Amino acid sequence: TVEGVSFNGGCNGNHQGISRLICGQNIDEVATKLEGVRCGGRGTSCPDQLSCALKKISEVINKENNV
């Protein structure tokens, strides 16, 4: 479960909104929903980067729990 999120850089308002929307949600579901979101002409976005981080965290948790 996602318990807290903070960002460095980017749009503060969007980050606050993302954080409020995903807190209390399942980490894998959030990662899937945010994956592939693009910002302007960039190949990624803050939500997409968060998705990548959540996937890595989920992998570590699963390894620790032998899942």
Image: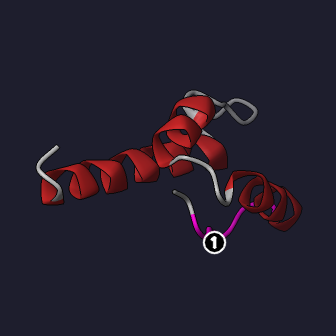
Which secondary structure class fits the magenta region best?
A: loop
Residue 19: name its quadrant.
bottom right
Q: Amino acid at mark 1?
A: Ser
Residue 49: image location, x then y, percent: 52, 47
Local packing at callout 1 (Cα closer than 10 Å; few below 14, some 14-19, many 20+) is few
Residue 33: image location, x then y, percent: 61, 31
Query: Number of callouts in the render?
Result: 1
Image: magenta residue range: 3-11
- Please give the residue where the numbered disc 1 appears in the rendered image: 6
Left or right position of 66 against 4: left
Residue 8: image location, x then y, percent: 62, 72
Above or below — where is 12 with respect to 37?
below
The residue nearer to you, when weighing 5 against 26, is 26
Left or right position of 23 against 65: right
Magenta segment: does it hold 7? yes
Name the secondary structure under disc 1: loop
Left or right position of 58 against 37: left
